[in-house]
Image (tube, helix red, strand yellow):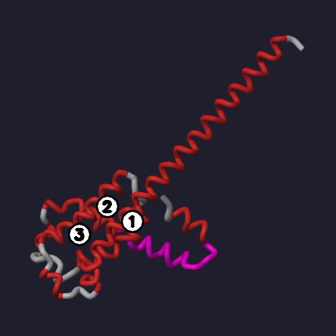
Amino acid sequence: MPVQYWVTLFQDLGVAATALGLIFGYWEYLRQGRMRRAEKYFELVRSFAQFDPILDLLRTDHPSLRRLKPWQRERFLGFYEDLALLIHSGLIQEDLAYYTFGYWLDRAWESRYFWQDPKNREDGYWFLLRQLYFRMKAREPRLYAFIHRHNHGGDYARVRRTFRF
């Protein structure tokens, strides 16, 4: 066998190894990105647990909501502003965020007792919160229709593709 044959063979093997390395490297990059997004999501879920006392009051729109201290309201609403930033940056999938946290935003927004003055909802300080709320409300019928359509075990693959990291 001539030397040229061996040179060509090793060059082809080198190109193939490089291509495989690039493909597997990109695959690992995507996997790590999903893992980071999942970690961020579960971190949000854990930090949301600090609002359990507020959530208990929101569940029934209890008049005790008026007695919340301003910093408690601001911290709760600030969580949603942070969530809006994470959605806009693509770190949290929009449908997943609405499914997980949207109910409580809706309860707070519609509450008679949560807001000391209903005009506070229109304050420029809560711009991201308002934007998140109205965007969520616009997507709500589509999300509930999806959930209703796939609320049985046979559509697991479709649901898995929709609610992903």
In the image, residue 152 lies in the stretch drawn in magenta? yes
Q: Is residue 159 magenta?
A: no
How many numbered marks, from 0 up? 3
Instruction: Report the residue at 17% width, 67% height from top.
Output: 74
Cα distance in 3D space between marks 2 and 1 = 8 Å
**Residue, x 60% and y 70% (percent of image)?**
156
Q: CA distance from mark 2 to mark 3?
A: 11 Å
**Callout 2 amino acid:** Leu
Front residue of 38/91: it is: 38
Between discs 2 and 1, the one toward the N terminus: 2
Across and down, in percent, residue 2 comes to: 87, 11
In the visual, does 165 lie left or right of 106?
Answer: right
Q: Amino acid at mark 1?
A: Ala
Query: Does the CB distance between marks 2 and 1 fall below 8 Å?
Result: yes
The label on residue 76 is 3
Residue type, numbered disc 3? Phe
The part of the image, by quadrant, that contains residue 61 is: bottom left
Which label is found at residue 97? 1
| Residue 107 percent location from the top left of the image | 27, 79
What range is drawn magenta here? 137-155
Give the answer, above or below, for where 105 lies relative to 56. Answer: above
Q: Residues under labels 1 and 3: Cα distance?
A: 15 Å
Q: Quadrant of the N terminus?
A: top right
Q: Label for residue 44?
A: none
Please rate how many residues cluster around mark 1, counting C-alpha atoms within 10 Å: few if below 14, some from 14 to 19, many from 20: some
Disc 2: which residue:
83
Tell me if mark 3 has few (under 14), some (14-19) or many (20+) residues whose alpha carbon lies within 10 angstroms of its own. Answer: some
Picture residue at 16% right of the left edge, 87% below the top: 63
Q: Are marks 2 and 3 in contact (CB under 8 Å)?
A: no
Of residues 142 and 101, the one nearer the viewer is 101
